[in-house]
Amino acid sequence: MQKITIAIDGYSACGKSTLAKALAAHLHYTYADSGAMYRCITLYALRKGVIKDGSFLEEEIVKLLPEIKLSFKFNPDTKSSDTFLNGENVEKDIRQMVVSENVSQVSAIHQVRVHMIAIQRELGKNRGIVMDGRDIGSNVFPDAELKLFMISDTEIRTQRRFDEIKAKGLHHVSYSDVKVNLLSRDHEDTHRRENPLVQAKDAIVLDNSDLTREEQLEFVVKLVTDLTLSES
Ligand code: DC
């Protein structure tokens, strides 16, 4: 069956990654978490002391880009892919609150976006990929055969992200910290000048507030099956 490109965009903590991972595993496609890539740049800049107390010089972050090598590797224990920064598994570190608090600003830098988008397009050049993020259907893969735009109730999103952070052993973060961060990232991601989060015209909206993981997967697998059958 012909492999296609699947772009999943939406607000923070809508369950994009969960659905994208399950879909990629089901279809035997590659999964790529574009948010994790922006998180890696942010983590590296924090470690290098270039971001201090929430402020930074864009040029300092841009200078670091050639030093940063990103990769993804499947983890058989968690059955999903881990993110590697210069060979180090940073899957847990990139989910820290301090990274979440700075990543929207870092992802708004022009050169950072150009650099990341080139890597994302290279990853998807042979199709057979599920990539999630904010501008995947609208900008990275405008020709993707299937584009989803995910939405979900704010309290449900907050609870999901809060549970995820706790499961990673980061116990000092409160529910309200998570909610404030999600709302502020929604604002920054939809209002930035370059490639803001928008629903692509040809995207299908998926509100998963009241759907189980299995129901979401079933819904999207049916869309993929209909598409690939009609194209073959
Ligand atoms: O999906 P996430 O919450 O891990 O993404 C972290 C941040 O990265 C998000 O607040 C905005 C940015 N991002 C982006 O600008 N473009 C993407 N394609 C993916 C993420």
Image (spheres, rainbow, N blue to C red):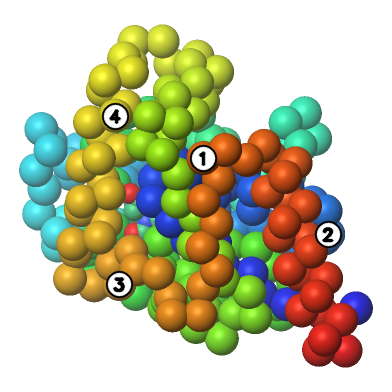
Q: Position of residue 118 (x, y in %)?
A: 46, 76
Q: Are marks 3 and 1 in contact (CB under 8 Å)?
A: no
Of the two numbered discs 1 and 4 on the same chain, state the one appearing first in sequence: 4
* Looking at the image, residue 59 lies above or below residue 176: below
Q: Is residue 50 above or below residue 2?
A: above
Q: Amino acid at mark 1?
A: Ser
Label of residue 7 in the image: none
**Callout 4 secondary element:** helix
Mark 3 to mark 1: distance in Å?
A: 26 Å
Residue on which disc 2 sits: 28
- Which residue was labeled with disc 4? 179
Answer with mark 3 or mark 1, whichever residue precedes in sequence. Answer: 3
Q: Residue at the location (28% across, 67% down)?
A: 196
Dot 3 lies on which element? loop
- The residue tagged 1 is 209
Quarter residue 123 falls in: bottom right
Give the residue pinned by disc 3: 195
What amino acid is at disc 3?
Asn
Disc 3/disc 4 C-alpha distance (Å): 24 Å
Residue 95 visible: no
Q: Quadrant of the N terminus?
A: bottom right
